[in-house]
Amino acid sequence: MPPPNPGNSTKLPTKSAVYLGAAGLEKAPLGRSSDTERRFSWSFRGVVTTASYDTRDIRSFFDQCASTGSAEQHGHAQRLLEYRLRLVRSLARPQPTDVLLDVGCGNGHHLLALGPEVARSVGIDISPGMIESARASLRSFPSKGNLTFEVDNAEELSGVADQSVDLAICIGAFEHMLDKRSVLASIYRVLKFGGRFFCLTPRADYIWYRTIAPLLGVATKHLSSDRMVTHNEFFALLDEAGFYRTRSAPWTFIPKGDMPAAAALLLTILDAIGRRARLNSFRGGLSVCAWKGAKPT
Ligand SMILES: C[S@@+](CC[C@H](N)C(=O)[O-])C[C@H]1O[C@@H](n2cnc3c(N)ncnc32)[C@H](O)[C@@H]1O
C-alpha cells in the first residue's frame, strides 16, 4: 500500500502539508473578498512525490517513514490489517508447518499476526529503520515463536536460502520495488517446489490512478520511482518468472489518505458498484496468489 507520510525533511513535505493536501479539498480565497462577493477556488493537492532514483533513495524514504511511526492513513488501522490478513488466509492458506517470508515487511505487523500460525517466519525489508521498528515490536510481543526480521533487498534475497520457503507474502510493497522481474525471480528461487507467493498491490488500471486523479491533477506517487502494474502485466511477470498457477481477486484498496475527502467518498461508492458489477477497475487493488510448480521429475 502507499506508505504513510514520512514527516519533515528538506526533501519531504511537512506532515501538516500532506494532511492538508492529501485529505484536502482546500478552500482558498482568490484576491480580496467582501461580504457580498466571495470567490473561492477549489484546489486539490495529492501526495507530495519524493524524487527517487535508486535503492538508496527508497531506503532513506522508508527509514524516515519508520522514524515517524508509519501510521495507517487510509482508514481504521486494525480493521484494514484484519481485512488484509483475511485475504492472506483465504487465498494463500498459511499452514502450521510453513516457513513464511514477508518481503518488504515494513514494521512487521502482518508477520507478528501470522507468525503464531506457522512454524517459522522471516521478515525482510530494505529499510533498516523499518526492521528496527519490527524488532522493537517483536521484543514486546508475547509469542515470539520463530520470528526474525532482517535487512535485505527483495531483488536479491541474499540472506534467504534456495527452496527454503513455503509461503512468501508481499503486502503493499511490490509497487515500490524497482526491478520487479528480479524480485519475482528471487521469490521463485527461495520458494520450495509447490510453494506459493501471495501479493497485495494497488492496480495501475484503478479508475483513481488512471482517470480521476489525472483529471483532477492530483499526484498519486509517494516516490517518483513507484510503479504499479495492471492485472495482465502482473500475470505476465509471474508467468515469466516460472509460476505455474495463479489466482487473483480484487482487493478493496482506497488510498483515502492521499485524496480529497469527496474523492474518497466517490471511490467508496465505485468500489461497491465494482464489487456488484464485477468492474475490477473500480476496485483499487489486486490480491494475487501464485504457485511454484512441483519438483520436475
Ligand atoms: C508501504 S511499506 C509496506 C510495509 C508492510 N508490508 C505493510 O504492509 O505495512 C513498503 C515497504 O517496502 C519496502 N521496500 C521497498 N523496496 C524494497 C526492496 N527492494 N526490498 C525490500 N523491501 C523493500 C520499504 O522499505 C517499505 O518498508
Image (cartoon, rainbow, N blue to C red):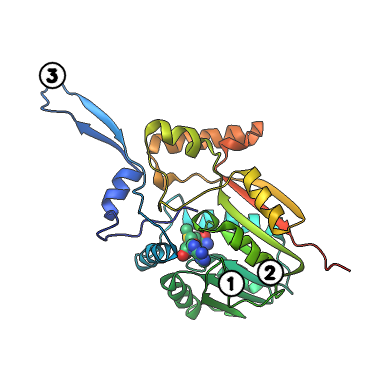
| Residue drawn at 49 percent across, 56 percent down | 176
Q: Which residue is mark 2?
A: 189
Q: Amino acid at mark 1?
A: Leu
User: Separation of disc 3 and disc 1 at Cα?
Assistant: 65 Å
User: Separation of disc 2 and disc 3 at Cα?
Assistant: 69 Å
Q: Which residue is mark 1?
A: 157
Q: Amino acid at mark 3?
A: Thr
Mark 1 and 2 residues: CB-CB less than 8 Å, in contact?
A: yes
Q: Is residue 90 visible?
A: no
Q: Is residue 175 visible?
A: yes
Disc 3 residue: CB within 8 Å of ligand 1: no
* Rendered image quadrant of residue 292: bottom right
Residue that lies at the very extreme toward the top in this rendered image: 36
Mark 2 and 3 residues: CB-CB less than 8 Å, in contact?
A: no
* Rendered image quadrant of residue 99: bottom right
Q: In this rendering, would 245 be left or right of 58? A: right
- Residue 36: assigned label: 3
